[in-house]
Amino acid sequence: MDRGRVILTREGREKLCRELEFLKGEKRRAIAKDLARARAHGDLSENAEYDAAKEAQAMNEKRIAGLEDTLTRARLLDDNAMPSDEALLGATVKVKDQNTGGEFDYMLVAEEESDFGLNKISVSSPVGKALLGHKAGDIVEIRVPAGELRYKIIGISR
C-alpha cells in the first residue's frame, strides 16, 4: 500500500467521510444482525449463511481500515494555488475526440475519488495521466487498452 500523501478535493473528502460513517454505523449493525440470525440456525461449521456474514464483516472492516488510512494521509486540494490554465488535479478538462468529434468533460481527481460514471477520472489512469500538465489547444495522444485516442483540449476550468 502506498503510504504517501493523498490529495483530495473537498467534495471527495466529504464523500469518503460519509462512506466511512455509513460503514461504521448502519452497515456494521446490519452485518451484526445477519450474524445473529445465522447463529440462531445452530451448527456454525456447516452454516453457509454464517460464513457469508463473516465474509461480509471482514470485507466491511477492510474497507473501513482503508478509508481511515486514506483520510489520515489526505490533504485538501487548494484550488487557489493552482494555475487555472493547466490540466492539473482538481481541474475539469473539456476535450474533443479528434477521431469521432465527440466532446467530453473529465474532472481530474485522485484515485480514491475517481468515479467514471460522474466523469471523475484518476490522474493515475491512462487518460488522466496523459492530460496532466497540458493546456487548452494541446493535442494529446493517449494509449489505452482499446487502441489510441487523440484528444484536443478545448477548455480547462476549476
Image (cartoon, rainbow, N blue to C red):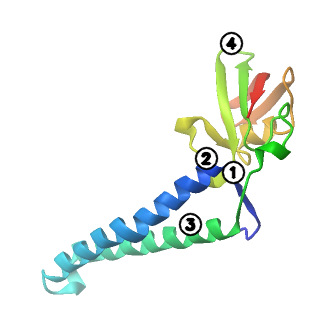
Q: Which mark is residue 101?
A: 4
Q: Amino acid at mark 1?
A: Ala
66 left or right of 146 in image: left
* Pair 4/2: label in front: 2
Residue at numbered disc 1: 110
Nearer to us of marks 3 and 4 is 3
For marks 3 and 1, the one nearer the N-term is: 3
Q: Position of residue 25 (x, y in %)?
A: 37, 69
Within 10 Å of disc 3 (Cα), the crowding (few <14, some 14-19, many 20+) is some
- Type of the residue with mark 3: Leu
Residue depicted at 53% across the width and 53% down the height: 15
Name the element at disc 4.
loop
Q: Position of residue 6 (x, y in %)?
A: 72, 60
Dot 3 or dot 4, earlier in sequence: 3
**Compared with residue 121, is residue 10 higher up or lower down, i.e. above or below?**
below
99, 8: nearer the viewer: 8
Q: Quadrant of the N terminus?
A: bottom right
Q: Are marks 1 and 2 in contact (CB under 8 Å)?
A: yes
Q: What residue is disc 2 on?
A: 114
Element type at mark 2: loop
